[in-house]
Amino acid sequence: MRYKSVFWGILFITAGLLWLLKSLQIVDFGWHDVLALWPFILIWTGISVIPVKNVIRIILDILTLCVALFVLLFPCNKPGNDGIRITDKVAVETLDSLEYAYAELSMNAGAGTFIFAPGNALIEIKGLEMSERYLNIVESQEDNMRSAEITLNIHPFVDIIDNNQEKEMYVLLNPTPVWEMDLDMGASRSIMDMRDYKIQSLSIDAGVSDIALTLGDKYSDVEVEVSTGVTNLSMKVPLNMKCVIENKSALSGLNFKGFTQLSKQEYVSESQSDTVKGVIHITLESGVSNLSVERY
């Protein structure tokens, strides 16, 4: 048995599987995290020169590879002593009622069930240990208008494996600001009740997921982009908002009840209320998915 052929074969197969799982968003890691694994190259080099049988070398290589994958997928190093670093803690309730506040949320999540609901603080996370999340808030102010940029990373892998059950996490957001949200949900189940929020833009990127999204009428011009892999998406839009759907999905089951198809990709549903609050633009790009958009 040729040691080098077996070693490189296993390494390339593992790299290909990781790339595929990351593309499907079943696992989540950054390529900079891969570069941080360079010490394992020294370990593999040391194993290759040990004067033992090739079978023992292969076993040591596989064990080292397993350790490297564990370090990559289940990182234990978090910024700060308690897993949270807050540049400026923002309490939206202190804003003057005449001020127009903005907030941007960039969220990267692993697996589990995520429930979005209104809260009093700008953002509050429940159902997680400190070590399972990274939260950073940067506050700025211009012309008496305060804004915040929020970065939230959630990776509750360890508890899910230990408890062998799906974990529920709550993301509580203050409804006062005008929100721009960029959500990378990975392989998860998400319940997003956005009726009380002023959503300017909402981008959802998910892999194997189940998403229930309810939009409101608090903002007059809403942009929603949903890009998914294998997904069951159920979306509700208010009757007093015009809704335009651009569907770029491939092998998907569609249920756009109450919409008129204008072209191969475009669907429109006019406001069904005497008071028109605005328009919601929805762009859907999915793989093998069930997509449902209905009025309420």
Image: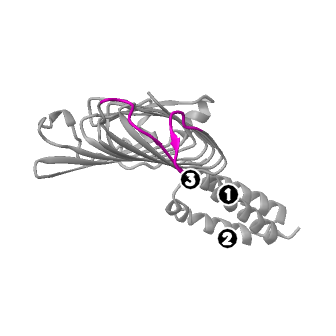
Which quadrant of the rendered structure holds the C terminus?
A: top left
95 relative position to 253: left or right: left
Which one is in front in this view, the residue at disc 2 or the one at disc 1? 1
Specify which label sits upstream in the sequence, 2 or 1: 2
Dot 2 falls on a residue whose secondary structure is helix
Which quadrant of the rendered structure holds the N terminus?
A: bottom right
The x and y percentages for residue 66 are 67, 53
Specify which label sits upstream in the sequence, 3 or 2: 2
The residue that mark 3 highlights is: 248
Question: Magenta region: which residues?
Answer: 255-274
Please report the residue visible at 38 percent of the width from the left and 35 percent of the height from the top: 271
In the picture, residue 200 is in which quadrant?
A: top left
Dot 1 falls on a residue whose secondary structure is helix
Please report the residue visible at 62 percent of the width from the left and 68 percent of the height from the top: 41
- Foreground residue, 117 or 138? 117
Sort mark 2 into few (<14), some (14-19) or many (20+) by Cα contacts within 10 Å.
Answer: few
User: Whole-Å distance between the Cαs marked 1 and 3?
Assistant: 39 Å
The x and y percentages for residue 222 are 35, 44
- Foreground residue, 47 or 135? 135
Q: Is residue 214 magenta?
A: no
The residue that mark 2 highlights is: 45
Specify which label sits upstream in the sequence, 1 or 3: 1
Relative vertical location of residue 204 with respect to residue 160 in this rendering, above or below: below
Q: Name the residue furthest right.
A: 1
Please report the residue visible at 24 percent of the width from the left and 35 percent of the height from the top: 176
Q: Are marks 2 and 1 in contact (CB under 8 Å)?
A: no
The x and y percentages for residue 214 are 43, 32
Q: Which mark is residue 65?
A: 1
